[in-house]
């Protein structure tokens, strides 16, 4: 199963490398949201709760973009049928898609977080990078787990563009609660990791629940 | 194939529900004491809280029914899950409206972000509102049932997690203690709440069975009508082939 998943993942990454459809679009979108929020909030620099809120809202909105595109190639070329004809476990498809989404999110954050620090973050607040990285990675796991499931669920419906944001964003409310609360003290003037462990533990619980749920139900989405 | 009859026992259930609702109403208005702090408006609590609990249990139960559908491939479980979500959504509107009225009466604002139950409920409500466009945008009945079940299971797992998250956030942002339902209620209030809760749960089950049997009857009718039309067509064809000279 890992080999099949790795093969599908390689295929997705190769397509992404050649077409450059998802990650650059996510990064450009994140920059655009920063500009919108700069003018919308009328603030040149942000810190504390406002900074962490802007960062997390931007990342979640960019996630919607990637989830919308996650099954695009399979859908447009009818490639999913070919994939399902191959004698591989359906779970391999899920694992590959979730892993691809996870990598896209990490790549997005490699661009979006430094851009955020450069454009909007108040000067002198970049010191808490390791802690921020830990929160982002644990959150990305949950985003990837639930994002791949929602992408597959929406892929076969007529109202795909509506279902993805409307289903995904409420499901991600716990992530933004935990992520933004954990990041807020990291981006405030006396930088300290206040309550970081608790929020990381909650994010880990969220990840575990949705990885297990997705693994259990994903097979039924591709069952025909 | 034996078809489940959803309407079985509906009449005694409906009578019990009517009695329980009447009893709950009587207790609310004549037995439960007037709350010293909030006065008469606190009585909305006996509608709001049972509705919220029953709606949430309905959402979780719909998830369990989704699991049963995926395991047994019996589409009637999907129908059960769908009707449970439908009714819970209707109760959800009631929860949000009564919660808002209660907040206005006791705090002077229509909406309070400090109230974790109400906030979590809004999130859950918005999530489940997507169930209907998703369900009805899939034509193939088998796939519709499967996708709906996957939605019901995922969202059902989300409900408790979401409550934990919102409560944690409120504790960090507004560290103050709310007296939770049932915790330190005086006996008379607690009894009234309990009876109201039972009445609401019975009302939910009655409506659920009623809607199920109505949906089931509509399906049967559609199937019979299709069969009738098919027979009529066949008969017409026979008549043509008999009547034609050759």
Image (cartoon, rainbow, N blue to C red):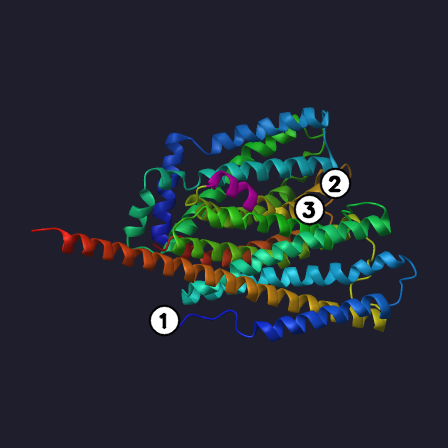
- Please tell me if label 3 and label 2 are on a single chain: yes
Which residue is labeled 1 in the image?
A: B1
Task: Place residue B233 in its image quadrant.
Answer: bottom left
Q: Residues within 10 Å of mark 3 (few under 14, many from 20)?
A: many
Q: Is residue A49 above or below residue B67?
A: above
Give the mark toward the camera: 1 or 3. 1
Residue B95 or A146: which is nearer the viewer? B95
Q: Is residue B61 magenta?
A: no
Which residue appears at 28% of the width and 56% of the height?
Answer: B232
Residue A177 or B77: which is nearer the viewer? B77
Q: From the image, give the main secondary structure of the stretch colored magenta.
A: helix
Q: Quadrant of the N terminus of chain A?
A: bottom left
Q: Secondary structure at mark 3?
A: helix
User: Over which residues does the magenta segment extend?
Assistant: A159-168
Q: Secondary structure at mark 1?
A: loop
Residue A66 can be seen in this image = yes
Which residue is labeled 3 in the image?
A: A182
Residue A201 can be seen in this image = no
């Amino acid at each position: 199963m890992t080999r099949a998943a790795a093969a599908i993942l390689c295929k997705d990454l190769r397509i992404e490398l050649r077409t450059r459809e998802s990650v650059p679009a996510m990064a450009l979108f994140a920059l655009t949201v920063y500009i919108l929020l700069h003018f919308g909030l009328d603030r040149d620099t942000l810190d504390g709760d406002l900074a962490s809120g802007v960062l997390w809202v931007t990342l979640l909105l960019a996630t919607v973009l990637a989830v919308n595109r996650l099954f695009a190639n399979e859908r447009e070329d009818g490639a999913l049928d070919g994939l399902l004809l191959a004698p591989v476990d359906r779970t391999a498809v899920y694992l590959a898609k979730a892993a691809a989404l996870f990598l896209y999110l990490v790549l997005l954050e490699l661009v979006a977080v430094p851009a955020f620090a450069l454009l909007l973050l108040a000067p002198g607040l970049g010191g808490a990078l390791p802690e921020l990285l830990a929160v982002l990675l644990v959150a990305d796991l949950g985003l990837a787990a639930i994002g791949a499931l929602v992408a597959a669920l929406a892929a076969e419906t007529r109202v795909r563009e509506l279902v993805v944001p409307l289903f995904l964003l409420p499901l991600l409310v716990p992530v933004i609660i935990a992520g933004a609360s954990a990041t807020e003290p990291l981006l405030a003037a006396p930088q300290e990791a206040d309550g970081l462990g608790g929020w990381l533990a909650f994010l880990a619980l969220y990840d575990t629940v949705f990885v297990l749920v997705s693994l259990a139900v994903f097979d039924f989405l591709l069952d025909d | 194939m034996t078809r489940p009859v959803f309407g079985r026992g509906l009449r005694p259930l409906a009578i019990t529900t009517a009695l329980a609702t009447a009893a709950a109403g009587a207790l609310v208005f004549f037995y439960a004491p007037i709350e010293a702090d909030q006065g008469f408006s606190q009585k909305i609590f006996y509608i709001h809280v049972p509705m919220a609990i029953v709606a949430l249990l309905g959402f979780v139960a719909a998830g369990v029914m989704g699991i049963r559908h995926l395991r047994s491939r019996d589409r009637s479980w999907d129908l059960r899950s769908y009707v449970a979500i439908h009714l819970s959504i209707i109760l959800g509107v009631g929860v949000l409206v009564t919660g808002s009225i209660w907040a206005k009466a006791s705090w002077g604002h229509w909406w309070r972000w400090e109230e974790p139950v109400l906030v979590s409920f809004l999130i859950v409500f918005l999530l489940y509102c997507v169930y209907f466009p998703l369900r009805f945008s899939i034509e193939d009945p088998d796939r519709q049932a499967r996708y709906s079940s996957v939605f019901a299971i995922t969202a059902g797992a989300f409900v408790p997690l979401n409550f934990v998250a919102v409560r944690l956030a409120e504790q960090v942002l507004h560290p103050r203690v709310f007296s939770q339902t049932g915790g330190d209620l005086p006996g008379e209030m607690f009894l009234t709440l309990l009876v109201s809760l039972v009445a609401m749960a019975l009302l939910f089950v009655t409506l659920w069975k009623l809607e199920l049997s109505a949906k089931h009857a509509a399906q049967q009718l559609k199937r019979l009508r299709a069969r009738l039309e098919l027979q009529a067509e066949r008969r017409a064809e026979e008549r043509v082939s008999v009547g034609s000279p050759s």
